Protein backbone atom coordinates (compact mmCIF):
# COMPACT_ATOMS: atom_id res chain seq x y z
CA UNK A 1 0.00 0.00 0.00
CA UNK A 2 1.35 3.40 -0.96
CA UNK A 3 1.50 5.98 1.79
CA UNK A 4 0.04 9.22 0.51
CA UNK A 5 -1.02 10.82 3.79
CA UNK A 6 0.24 10.46 7.34
CA UNK A 7 -3.10 8.85 8.18
CA UNK A 8 -2.03 5.89 6.00
CA UNK A 9 0.92 5.11 8.28
CA UNK A 10 0.25 2.10 10.48
CA UNK A 11 2.36 3.57 13.29
CA UNK A 12 0.24 6.76 13.26
CA UNK A 13 -2.94 4.68 13.37
CA UNK A 14 -1.65 2.77 16.40
CA UNK A 15 -0.52 6.04 18.02
CA UNK A 16 -4.05 7.38 17.57
CA UNK A 17 -5.38 4.28 19.29
CA UNK A 18 -2.90 4.85 22.12
CA UNK A 19 -3.98 8.48 22.56
CA UNK A 20 -7.61 7.39 22.80
CA UNK A 21 -6.77 4.77 25.44
CA UNK A 22 -4.80 7.33 27.47
CA UNK A 23 -7.59 9.90 27.30
CA UNK A 24 -10.12 7.32 28.49
CA UNK A 25 -7.90 6.21 31.37
CA UNK A 26 -7.20 9.76 32.48
CA UNK A 27 -10.88 10.65 32.81
CA UNK A 28 -11.20 8.30 35.77
CA UNK A 29 -11.90 10.21 39.01
CA UNK A 30 -8.59 9.75 40.87
CA UNK A 31 -6.47 10.01 37.73
CA UNK A 32 -8.27 13.12 36.51
CA UNK A 33 -7.51 14.92 39.79
CA UNK A 34 -3.76 14.42 39.40
CA UNK A 35 -3.47 17.32 36.99
CA UNK A 36 0.27 17.08 36.50
CA UNK A 37 0.39 13.39 35.63
CA UNK A 38 -2.86 13.52 33.67
CA UNK A 39 -1.69 16.40 31.52
CA UNK A 40 1.82 15.03 31.03
CA UNK A 41 0.72 11.55 29.91
CA UNK A 42 -1.86 13.08 27.57
CA UNK A 43 0.74 15.42 26.04
CA UNK A 44 3.16 12.53 25.57
CA UNK A 45 0.51 10.37 23.90
CA UNK A 46 -0.52 13.19 21.58
CA UNK A 47 3.14 13.87 20.84
CA UNK A 48 3.53 10.38 19.39
CA UNK A 49 0.82 11.05 16.80
CA UNK A 50 1.88 14.62 16.14
CA UNK A 51 5.54 13.84 15.53
CA UNK A 52 4.71 11.09 13.05
CA UNK A 53 2.44 13.50 11.17
CA UNK A 54 4.88 16.40 11.31
CA UNK A 55 7.79 14.25 10.20
CA UNK A 56 5.81 12.92 7.25
CA UNK A 57 5.19 16.45 6.03
CA UNK A 58 8.91 17.29 6.11
CA UNK A 59 9.26 15.26 2.90
CA UNK A 60 12.83 14.08 3.50
CA UNK A 61 13.65 10.70 4.97
CA UNK A 62 16.35 12.15 7.22
CA UNK A 63 14.01 14.67 8.85
CA UNK A 64 11.20 12.11 8.98
CA UNK A 65 13.43 9.65 10.84
CA UNK A 66 14.30 12.37 13.34
CA UNK A 67 10.63 13.04 14.06
CA UNK A 68 9.96 9.30 14.30
CA UNK A 69 12.72 9.08 16.87
CA UNK A 70 11.01 11.79 18.91
CA UNK A 71 7.67 9.99 18.56
CA UNK A 72 9.26 6.78 19.79
CA UNK A 73 10.73 8.58 22.79
CA UNK A 74 7.30 10.00 23.61
CA UNK A 75 5.91 6.48 23.54
CA UNK A 76 8.50 5.51 26.14
CA UNK A 77 7.47 8.51 28.21
CA UNK A 78 3.87 7.28 28.15
CA UNK A 79 5.01 3.83 29.31
CA UNK A 80 6.92 5.38 32.20
CA UNK A 81 3.91 7.48 33.26
CA UNK A 82 1.74 4.37 33.15
CA UNK A 83 3.85 2.89 35.96
CA UNK A 84 3.16 5.94 38.11
CA UNK A 85 -0.57 5.64 37.39
CA UNK A 86 -0.50 1.95 38.31
CA UNK A 87 1.53 2.55 41.47
CA UNK A 88 -0.89 5.27 42.58
CA UNK A 89 -3.85 2.95 41.91
CA UNK A 90 -5.26 5.30 39.28
CA UNK A 91 -5.57 2.37 36.88
CA UNK A 92 -6.03 -1.37 37.20
CA UNK A 93 -3.37 -3.85 36.09
CA UNK A 94 -5.48 -4.91 33.08
CA UNK A 95 -5.73 -1.29 31.93
CA UNK A 96 -2.00 -0.85 32.44
CA UNK A 97 -1.33 -3.99 30.39
CA UNK A 98 -3.53 -2.83 27.50
CA UNK A 99 -2.01 0.66 27.40
CA UNK A 100 1.53 -0.68 27.82
CA UNK A 101 1.03 -3.22 25.03
CA UNK A 102 -0.33 -0.50 22.75
CA UNK A 103 2.68 1.72 23.55
CA UNK A 104 5.03 -1.15 22.86
CA UNK A 105 3.34 -1.99 19.56
CA UNK A 106 3.41 1.67 18.52
CA UNK A 107 7.10 1.88 19.34
CA UNK A 108 7.86 -1.26 17.34
CA UNK A 109 5.94 0.05 14.34
CA UNK A 110 7.77 3.37 14.53
CA UNK A 111 11.14 1.63 14.78
CA UNK A 112 10.32 -0.62 11.85
CA UNK A 113 9.34 2.39 9.78
CA UNK A 114 12.58 4.14 10.77
CA UNK A 115 14.56 1.12 9.57
CA UNK A 116 12.60 1.08 6.30
CA UNK A 117 13.34 4.77 5.71
CA UNK A 118 17.01 4.15 6.49
CA UNK A 119 17.13 1.44 3.82
CA UNK A 120 15.66 3.83 1.23
CA UNK A 121 18.80 5.99 1.12
Image (spheres, rainbow, N blue to C red):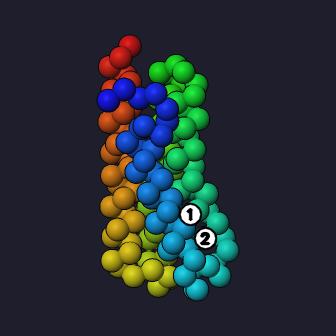
Near mark 1 (Cα within 10 A), the count class, few <14, some 14-19 or many ≥20, is: many
In this picture, is 96 found above or below 76? below
Q: Is residue 35 left or right of residue 119?
A: right
In what element is the residue under mark 1?
Answer: helix
In what element is the residue under mark 2?
Answer: helix
- Please report the residue visible at 57 percent of the width from the left and 53 percent of the height from the top: 46
x, y percent for residue 110: 39, 40
Q: Is residue 119 left or right of residue 35?
A: left
In this picture, is 20 found above or below 109? below
Task: Say which quadrant the N terminus sits in.
Answer: top left
- Please report the residue visible at 67 percent of the width from the left and 74 percent of the height from the top: 35
Q: Which residue is mark 2?
A: 38
x, y percent for residue 21: 46, 66
Give the CA distance from mark 2 to mark 1: 6 Å
Near mark 2 (Cα within 10 A), the count class, few <14, some 14-19 or many ≥20, is: many
In this picture, is 12 found above or below 116? below
x, y percent for residue 112: 32, 36
- Please report the residue visible at 37 percent of the width from the left and 42 percent of the height from the top: 10
In the rendered image, is residue 75 in sight? no
In this picture, is 98 found above or below 46? below
Q: Is residue 121 left or right of residue 49?
A: left
Task: Say which quadrant the C terminus sits in.
Answer: top left
Residue 81's disc is none
Please tell me in which quadrant of the rendered image residue 8 appears.
top left
Q: Given contact means CB atoms under 8 Å apart, are the residues at marks 2 and 1 in contact? A: yes
x, y percent for residue 83: 44, 71
Q: Which residue is mark 1?
A: 41
In the rendered image, is residue 12 in sight? yes
Amino acid sequence: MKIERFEDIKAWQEARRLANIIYKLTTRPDFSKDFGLRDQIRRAAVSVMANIAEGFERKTNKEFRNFLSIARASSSEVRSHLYVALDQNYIEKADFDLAYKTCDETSKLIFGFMKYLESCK
